[in-house]
Amino acid sequence: MSQYVLALDQGTTSSRAVVFDETARIVAIAQQEFEQIYPAPGHVEHDPEAIWETQLATARAVLTDAEIDASDVAAVGIANQRETTVLWERDSGRPVANAIVWQSRVTADRCARLKADGYESLFREKTGLVLDPYFSGTKIAHLLDEIDGLRERAERGEVLFGTVDSFLAWRLTGGRYHVTDVSNASRTLLLNIHTLEWDDELLKILGVPRAMLPDVVESSGVIGDLEAEILGAAVPLAGMAGDQQAATFGQACFSVGEAKNTYGTGCFLLMNTGEEAVPSEGGLLTTVGWSLGGKVTYCLEGAVFVGGAVVQWLRDGLGLISQASEIEALAAECESTDGVYLVPAFVGLGAPYWDPSARGTLIGITRGTARPQLARAALESIAYQSRDLLELMQREAGVRLEGLRVDGGASANDLLMQFQADLLDVDVLRPEILETTALGAARFAGLATGFWESAEEIAAAWRLERQFSCEMDNAERQRLYEGWQRAVKRSRDWAE
């Protein structure tokens, strides 16, 4: 009997593969970084072949590291960077261009025209999203318009579109399955999240041919077998979800009102709203969480574009630290920032502001400001941005959060997690397993194949590593947050 599940965790800067056993213990992890391509300011691309090659290499390496064969694997699940857009030839499987990454602002002008033409409310109503270059739909249209003859080929069905999950599924199954799951489809500006079908009106507005779109499947369900030569056996591909939805599932946020925040390159806060797609008036996203056993779970989501990346900036841009791990000790050298605020709006601000013209702002500096204050201000900016999201989320969902489950690399920072609890006045709950994105992908695949029996079994297996509780009085919390709000105002509407 197969004793393991393999998760493919395809991220923005690296591809990873993780093997889990039946107790959800991590048996082995493999990871490879790949090149980030910046063809112009604000434009971000990936080579799809680099995505495939690194993901395949890590999948093979992790089996070797775990000392198992593919025949020992019950199922494979995929989690992926979500809105990144790949177009490839149906016959050859070759990409027709670099992938346009979710971070890219290349379609900002296109989105502005759509807003000016009065389409924002229609897209909001049908997709739960805002008209922003973050999402896939305008990226597809951009490529079709920029590459000679590509639109005509796409209309004939010769060129296919997919988010990264779809591209990987196509390659893994030898081109037999052109699919995406509902969570990824809900990030394209093309899916009606209420009917769970591609929407002809939206396709027409954006100029995207239906013939290039994948079939939409559940997040947990057997799609088909991998080509045997890929890993050495025809393992079922049985789970697919966008990385943040996978992390929410991996965190066992199965009840209405439960939420998780992932502290990665950005921060992504998702709250389970159950079978109701809760609309947002304040700048959050309404998104499909997952589909399982014919039942759809919706989430409210807030996206912070620069979370842990602000620490990378201190390291690579300013040389303030030599390794990211040094940030906590440096920040701990001072008890406060002494009124210094850093708003890391390096690529604009995400939810709830959606201001692409905002720019990074460092304010409150005095002659006494030194490296520790800057380090602490950088860490605190991650927590402030997360409070922006959570305050709005609780109001719009009508739910008071009892605890916030956290994951991602920066969640290992105790100083940040304590400040987050202080700022929210909510318990911050860090689990034993921080690889929640990969775990969610594995859980989806394992449920589909009977490797795990139920969501109840998964919820019972969630384990707390540490709880951070509020230690700050309300007056101080409000004073600090009001200062943050003043700093944000000064960062906005800056770039022309």
Image (cartoon, helix red, strand yellow):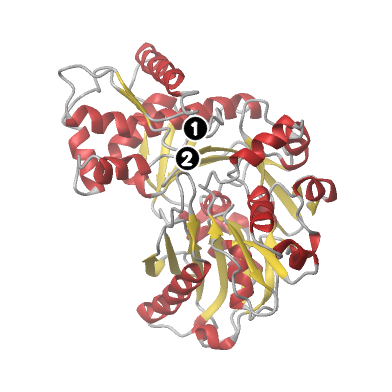
Quickly name the residue at label 2: 305
Q: Is residue 466 visible?
A: no
Image coordinates for residue 267, horizontal then vertical, percent = 46, 41
Image coordinates for residue 86, horizontal then vertical, percent = 60, 62
Q: In the image, what residue type sits under mark 1?
A: Leu
Residue at the spot 72% in from the left edge and 30% down from the top edge: 116
Q: Could you tell whether 418 is left or right of 349 in the image?
A: left
- In the image shown, does 339 or 157 lie closer to the viewer? 157
Q: How far apart, in angstroms, are the residues tagged by discs 1 and 2?
A: 7 Å
Q: In the image, what residue type sits under mark 2?
A: Phe
Which label number is shown at residue 47?
none
Image coordinates for residue 311, horizontal then vertical, percent = 30, 41
Residue 469: quadrant of the picture: top left
Q: Are marks 1 and 2 in contact (CB under 8 Å)?
A: yes
Q: Residues within 10 Å of mark 2 (few under 14, many from 20)?
A: many
Secondary structure beneath label 1: loop
Secondary structure beneath label 2: loop
**Dot placed on the residue nearer the N-terminal end, 1 or 2:** 2
Instruction: Say if 14 sits above or below 424 in the image.
Output: below
Quickly name the residue at label 1: 349
Instruction: Say if 182 sits above or below 310 in the image.
Output: below
